[in-house]
Amino acid sequence: MITLQAVQLFVHVAEHSTFASAATRFGVTPSTVTRQIQQLEVALGARLLQRSTRNVSLTEAGRHYLPHAQALLEAHESGSAVLNQLTQRPSGTLRLTAPLVLTTLYIVPAIPSFLKKYPTVKIDLQLSDDYLNLIDVGFDVAIRQGNTHDSSVVARTLFRFDRSLCASPAYLASHGIPTTPEDLKNHDCIPYNRTNRDMVWQFQKNGKREKVVPTGHLQSNCISSLKQLTLAGLGICRLPNKLIQNELSTGSLIRVLPDWQSVVDDQLDTLYAVYPQRRLLSPKVAAFLEHVQQYLRDNNLVVPPPPPSQ
């Protein structure tokens, strides 16, 4: 007899080439994984996996069966999600991974009212700037900065946030105040860099857009570190407005190029909710994302899409 768990275990092993990962993901022993897949092979009358001491690979029969097994799981998950949405209120534990600073600024403040509205939901929030594999670690959804265009996941735009160019008074006193984006080429700039690619800062004024590739002695993938480096007078940085509103009001940071609007970047200035491609949103995930977006709208924290280039 073919069981749903056996198909789930086969698909996981086929996608990740490891029995141990399947055992961890589904909370069973490695011997159970082996036994279930062997029973599946007997039921199908074909060997699906080729095992060796070092790796696991698909046989020809396994390669042909895999897309059908994936479609079976997708149909099951889709059907279950539809029934849940019709018959259930959001409940259970929502496992969420999200970046530290941006989540603390924008998402954590929305959690108290969400839990008050949905008392049968519990939240397990793990803050990390690492891009974890959702299926391997068992998260329901991830909040990520920028769209990685990963075909195995669905990326839903959650919201955009705005940034301002700023520097410390000490830095500006020592290096001068830039008056145009072009002037930034002669300054120490501190870009956010998560992917080791050239960062591009875009500015707009009176319908004119200019782009600058920031250069300097420092870069980081940690927004809180960028703020500290900027406060220390080490350069000019482009930081989220909400993160620096107190420093701007006290004068410990000063806006640079205040007449130029910092253009929202879809990769750097957008947070996405990401979940596995094969799954429809469960009621708890859908309710949480809708609540967060409504909270941001109510508190005027949502930034519209960037205007088209002139």
Image (tube, rainbow, N blue to C red):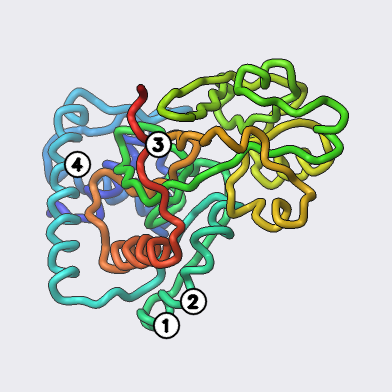
Image location (x, y in percent) of residue 205: 48, 30
In the figure, is residue 228 to the left or right of 75? right
In the figure, is residue 200 to the left or right of 290? right
In the figure, is residue 74 to the left or right of 295? left
Give the Cα distance between marks 4 and 1.
Answer: 37 Å
**Is there any visible trace of residue 53 in the rendered image?**
no
Residue holding disc 4:
70
Q: Which mark is residue 116?
A: 1
Number of dots carrying numbers: 4
Q: Residue at x 18, y 69 (%)?
A: 84
Give the Cα distance between marks 2 and 1.
Answer: 6 Å
Q: As rendered, which of 102 and 232 lies closer to the eye?
A: 232
Q: Nearer the viewer, mark 4 or mark 2?
A: 2
Say what secondary structure mark 1 lies in.
Answer: helix
Q: Residue at x 49, y 66 (%)?
A: 124
What amino acid is labelled 1 in the image? Lys
Q: Residue at x 31, y 50 (%)?
A: 35
Q: As rendered, which of 177 and 58 lies closer to the eye?
A: 177
Quadrant of the rendered image containing residue 19:
top left
In the figure, is residue 176 to the left or right of 193? right
